Amino acid sequence: MTSKALIVFTRNPKLGKCKTRLAKSIGDKEALDIYKYLLQHTASVAKQISGKRFVFYSENIQEGDIWHNAFFNKRLQKGNDLGERMENAFKALFSEGFKKVIIVGSDLLDLNHEIIEKAYLKLDKNDIVIGPAEDGGYYLLGMKNLHKNIFKNKNWGTESVRAETLNDLKNNSVYMLKELNDIDTFEDMQHYEELKPFYSK
């Protein structure tokens, strides 16, 4: 059995339920189309990773979608907030015997497989690997053991999350990857040429 697991957290792509901050600027349909494009990018990146791949859906498990069963194991997120859902996902995979578990978000055009592979490598000599996002959160979190405290008492989706997480880990060795931009608002996406067709019709 492989010792590496990759978790992708995804929202079920539904009109009016995805990228709500972005939708305020460009509309629900355009925001959904962009989210589907970001999901497709994330799926193609994840397929290149050696190890076991898991996609955790927010509402219900879907068949026949971009997360093909040949590449991804499908699970359901469990918990009342993002922290609880992430903790439960990590806990489940550690209990199944995985030694290195990494979770990534599904809204980064700048994410590539080299970044994820580097994160696995850095776990050899570090307790935690974090991929910092420009908005103060993180786009990647990797660990070898469950650190429950980092999933508690956070204002998820705010700029304080990463600082609070690092404070929780001050007695651990943490490796920081390069900072990337995740796409939550219109400002986040304006410099991506490939996204312009979605909102400049």
Image: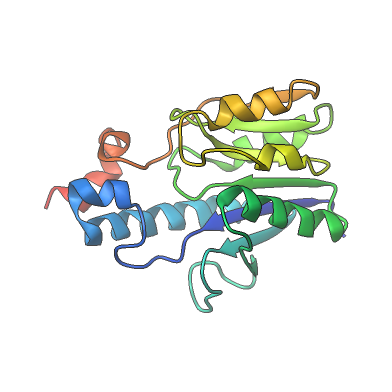
Where residue 195 sits in the image (x, y, percent)?
Answer: 28, 46
* Closest to the observer, 187 or 88: 88
- Say if 151 sits above or below 170 in the image: below
Quadrant position of residue 109: top left
- Say if 126 sits above or below 20 in the image: above
Q: Is residue 179 visible?
A: yes
- Say if 117 sits above or below 94 in the image: above
Residue at x 45% of width, y 42% of height: 108
Q: Quadrant of the N terminus?
A: bottom right
Where residue 87 sits in the image (x, y, percent)?
Answer: 70, 50
Residue most extreme to the front: 153
Where residue 141 sits in the image (x, y, percent)?
Answer: 65, 39
Q: How is the image coloured?
A: rainbow
Residue most extreme to the bottom: 63
Quadrant position of residue 96: bottom right
Residue at x 22% of width, y 52% of height: 198
* Closest to the observer, 103 or 42: 103
Residue 84 lies left or right of residue 64; in this view the side is right
Residue at x 11% of width, y 53% of height: 201
User: How many numbered marks are there?
Assistant: 0
Residue 105 lies left or right of residue 121; in this view the side is left
